[in-house]
Image: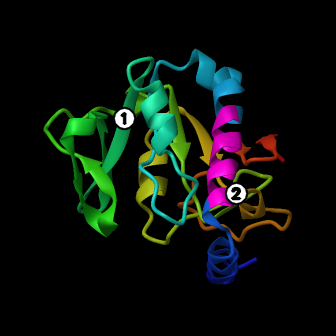
Amino acid sequence: MKKAEIRQRIKALKKAVGKESAKIAATKAFAQVEECAEFQRAQHVMVYHSLPDELSTHAFIEKWHGLKKLYLPRVNGEILEILPYDATKLQSGSFNIEEPTGDEIVDGNDMDLIIVPGIAFDCKGNRVGRGKGYYDRLLSETTAIKIGVGYDFQLLEDNIETEEHDVKVDLIITEHRCVYVTEN
């Protein structure tokens, strides 16, 4: 399935999700993240600061800040920088996403785990992002475990058409499923 088609289809499905259903889905999905061994072992975790159409990460960040070392991405030109999370040092950045401020940039290989947003995922670990390649560039340079998180309808049964630069995730978690990716 082509990425442009997937983006259109998922956008329509997201618009149909009510606020209460979105909150319940986020709570269930992130409860599954918390239960997985990869998260339990991880000390340094990068997570995204969610946009309104994504599963909300805000409660998850507040819960785990201080219990684990959390990091957020910040757009700098064509790359994502990784900075420590500090609720007092956030500002609206690129694409109106809350981003960390400061100079304490951390290497991606210092992360144990990266929670990755996506428009869609398939069971082989392929992902469709928003089309700018930020996460693919970041993920290609780290050995961290990569967990894709989204609504159940974002986990597609059809294979996603991929390009050479696309980077797979290791695990996909939705409010209903937890799919470990195995090499095929």
Apparent side of residue 60 relative to residue 119 in the rendered image (left or right) = left
In this view of the protein, which residue sits in the foreground, 11 or 116?
11
Q: Is residue 170 visible?
A: no
Apparent side of residue 52 relative to residue 70 in the rendered image (left or right) = right
From this view, report whether residue 53 is shown above or below residue 143.
Answer: below
Task: Give how far across and how far down residue 105 sits, in percent.
Answer: 23, 36
* Disc 1/disc 2 C-alpha distance (Å): 22 Å
From this view, report whether residue 16 is shown above or below residue 93.
Answer: below
| Predominant SS along the magenta part | helix
Q: Which segment is the magenta one?
A: 20-31
Q: Marks 2 and 1: in contact by CB < 8 Å?
A: no
Q: Is residue 22 visible?
A: yes
From this view, report whether residue 161 is shown above or below residue 113.
Answer: below
User: Which dot, 1 or 2, sits closer to the camera?
Assistant: 2
Q: Amino acid at mark 1?
A: Tyr
Task: Give how far across and how far down residue 183 sits, in percent.
Answer: 79, 43
- Residue behind mark 2: 151
In this view of the protein, which residue sits in the foreground, 159 or 150?
150
Q: Quadrant of residue 178?
A: top right
Task: Give how far across and how far down residue 52 sits, in percent.
Answer: 48, 64
Label 2: element kind:
loop
- Residue behind mark 1: 71
| Quadrant in the picture for the N terminus | bottom right
User: Quick one: label 1 or label 2, which is nearer the N terminus?
Assistant: 1
Task: Give the crowd class for mark 1: few <14, some 14-19, many >=20 residues within 10 Å.
Answer: many
Q: How many badges with numbers are in the image? A: 2
The residue positioned 44% from the left and 20% from the top of the image is: 68
Q: Quadrant of residue 110?
A: top left
